[in-house]
Amino acid sequence: MCVSDICVDNVCMEDVQDSLESCDEDADCSGLACGLQTWTTTSSRVCCPTNTTVSNDRPDSSYYSETYCTGQATLDSCGSDDMCENAACGRSTYVDDAPTICCPGDATVYLNTPSVSYRSAYYCTGLSVGQACGSNDMCVSDICVDNVCMEDVQDSLESCDEDADCSGLACGLQ
């Protein structure tokens, strides 16, 4: 038993741990929040910089949950909106089994998955030109043609999915 009542990784500590230092439980931390640092299978337990945690399914199992630090930055892996600083966790691009990240566009859209129409998922907005998309809402340019974010509207005789994709605002069969 430790004199200080603070034991981390089987080592007696003199005082509570600061942000990002190793911990075993909330009481080990000055901010009273100990969680896995990132939503990965190799993450370590640290005192959370935001002093808050959220319980979420593990990335490798929907049957087991863990406590994770909140306030994850844009593009960090995530398991729920609550984990992200911007409150937007979604699939990184419109491809099957794309990893979930804290979205660059600060929002998500709920769409059917690319290959299975009866399955749906949340996908990130704020995607750049050339990234796989499933709707205009996913792209910074607000233009998704043939499941790719485009820089600008399409000219006459170029591929389109809807009227808004075209400079002449008319999409049709050739």
Image (cartoon, rainbow, N blue to C red):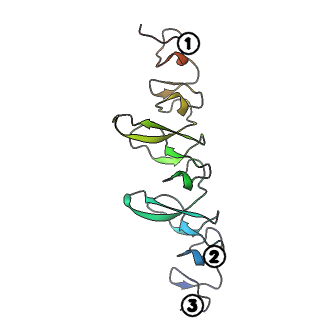
What residue type is disc 1 on? Leu
Q: Secondary structure at mark 1?
A: loop
Task: Please provide percent x and percent y for residue 26.
Answer: 57, 74
Task: Please provide percent x and percent y for residue 52.
Answer: 61, 64
**Which residue corresponds to the image point at 58% horizontal and 24% vertical from the top-left?**
151
What residue type is disc 2 on? Gln
Q: Is residue 161 above or below residue 32?
A: above
Left or right of 136? Residue 14 is: right
Residue under label 1, please give it: 169
What residue type is disc 3 on? Cys
Task: Please provide percent x and percent y for residue 149.
Answer: 52, 28
Q: State which tag comes first along the sequence, 2 or 1.
A: 2
**Which residue corresponds to the image point at 50% horizontal and 45% vertical from the top-left?**
90
Left or right of 145? Residue 84 is: right
Q: State which tag comes first along the sequence, 2 or 3.
A: 3
**Which residue corresponds to the image point at 61% horizontal and 67% vertical from the top-left?**
20
Residue under label 3, please give it: 2
Q: Nearer the viewer, mark 2 or mark 1?
A: 1
* Quadrant location, the C terminus: top left
CA distance for labels 2 and 1: 60 Å
Q: Residue furthest top?
A: 174
Residue under label 2, please give it: 17
Task: Please provide percent x and percent y for residue 147.
Answer: 45, 28
Question: How many numbered marks does the figure carry?
Answer: 3
**Which residue corresponds to the image point at 37% horizontal and 58% vertical from the top-left?**
61
